[in-house]
Image (tube, grey):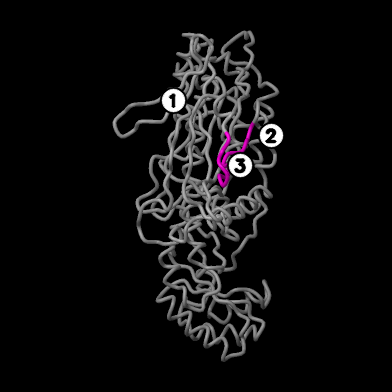
Amino acid sequence: MNGRSPGRRASTGPVRQLSRGARRNERVMSMCPGAGAPTALLTDMYEYTMLDAALQDGTADRRCVFEVYTRHLPLGRRYGVAAGAGRLMESIDAFHPSEDDLRFLSDRHIVSPPTLRWLEDYRFSGSIRGYREGETFFPDSPILQVEGTFAQCTLLETLILSTLNYDSAVASAASRMVSVAEGRPCMDMGARRANEWAAVSAARSAIVGGFQGTSNLQAAKLYDLPAIGTAAHCFTLLHDSERDAFASQIQALGKGTTLLTDTYSVREAVQTAVELAGPDLGGVRLDSGDLASLAQQVRALLDSLGARKATITVTNDLDEYAIAALKTAPVDSYGVGTQLVTGSGAPTCAMVYKLVEREGADGSMVPVAKRSVGKASMPGRKLAFRALEDGRAVSEQVVAGGEEALDAFQPPEGWRNLLDTYMEDGETNPDFVGREALLRARDRRAASLAELPIAAMSLMKDEPVIPTLTQSLG
């Protein structure tokens, strides 16, 4: 793997006109969430000050391997779902300081003039391997491995962690909701409960976790997702009567639309809906009250009025526990907001980015690790496998060692490799970005979850459903 550093060119000052790489950055960012905000400053200051010091002391070009993992799952969770890697590759492709970024770093005296000149041509040219999006993970799973020079890798720490921590948290929560929904579609309706661009990321991550669509039009546009939405309570309140509001919506959207029926009396609203749309009524939505009892009453009423094909969608601060409680109710789909975009109480996976191997003064690679109490890390680059018996996962197997030892390692029969190459020598594998990659990630989540013991589906708080076993090849 090539961890070469970008070339350094002489400059007449601390900043210059945008390079071809910077112009390419602008084009890439036009397709990414948060377009207009350069990714090169989506970071913590100490990443630039470390870069500056390493360039001055001569260690910046040392080849390094960084690893992303979590020490623990959110309390009581049985598994996590990896998400965000495809989005991350787009962000890394766009990670290049703009002229304005360089001026900011200069004006604040964050880095020295030589480092500013080095940054003018920054582009990550290393390699990245990791868990496929949609793959389940556990404590100490090496979810992402980043290899390159220290200078290149250290700048990406916060971008990597902020992306993977949030996206995986949402995908993990979404997966739990989808599991208990038992085939009934779950839809993202959480945009108004998050930062505007976090909402776009959440919509994408929800798809990884098994959701079927989103109310967020920006996410629908970026990732070609099914978009949902008809009308809110304010639309009913705007009109002189509920009948007028329903008639207007049906005229605009057709009889197959879904009408919101809990602004006033649910029973009267359903009767009015069927009177206006007839048996072709698409569906009704319930957004308050005892959803299970209301769904039962509404289903009986719809059937008695001849609208047997009309569906029932429920919303109102749903989480996996509320969805599980509705299992026996005649509900056809769920709209989930706040609990989805906040990871259902766990908005981060507590992932960390740690140096596990670096080039020594003699050019050889040296395993390194923290010894901090409660935060000790395992040295050396890793391989990762899911050990299966009769098609069922029994453990997560993490193997550490030097590059040659790992290249020669032969996993036992029944061990499934978990690592794929996202980027090689700075070139992103196109198989892992875009809409088709996102849909494959959703399929991967379903397949990976199906391998786990059935206890993974339980909402009872307990330990990870399979253990993580580690070994070192010395």
Residue closest to the eye, 229 or 204 = 204
Q: Which residues are magenta?
A: 410-423
Residue 332 percent across, percent down from the top left: 55, 73
Residue closest to the eye, 151 or 382 = 382
Left or right placement of residue 433 versus residue 134 in this view: right
**Amino acid type shown at disc 1:** Met
Q: According to the image, label 2 marks what residue?
A: 27
Which residue reaches farthest bottom? 304
Q: According to the image, label 1 marks what residue?
A: 45
Q: Is residue 103 something that shows in the picture?
A: no
Left or right placement of residue 100 versus residue 316 in this view: right
Residue closest to the eye, 28 or 343 = 343
User: Could you tell which of marks 2 and 1 lies nearer the N-terminus?
Assistant: 2
Judging from the image, what secondary structure is the residue with disc 2 in? helix
Which residue: 45% across, 73% down?
326
Q: Is residue 417 magenta?
A: yes
Judging from the image, what secondary structure is the residue with disc 1 in? helix
Taking 136 as reference, is 292 above or below it? below
Which residue: 63% across, 49% down?
438
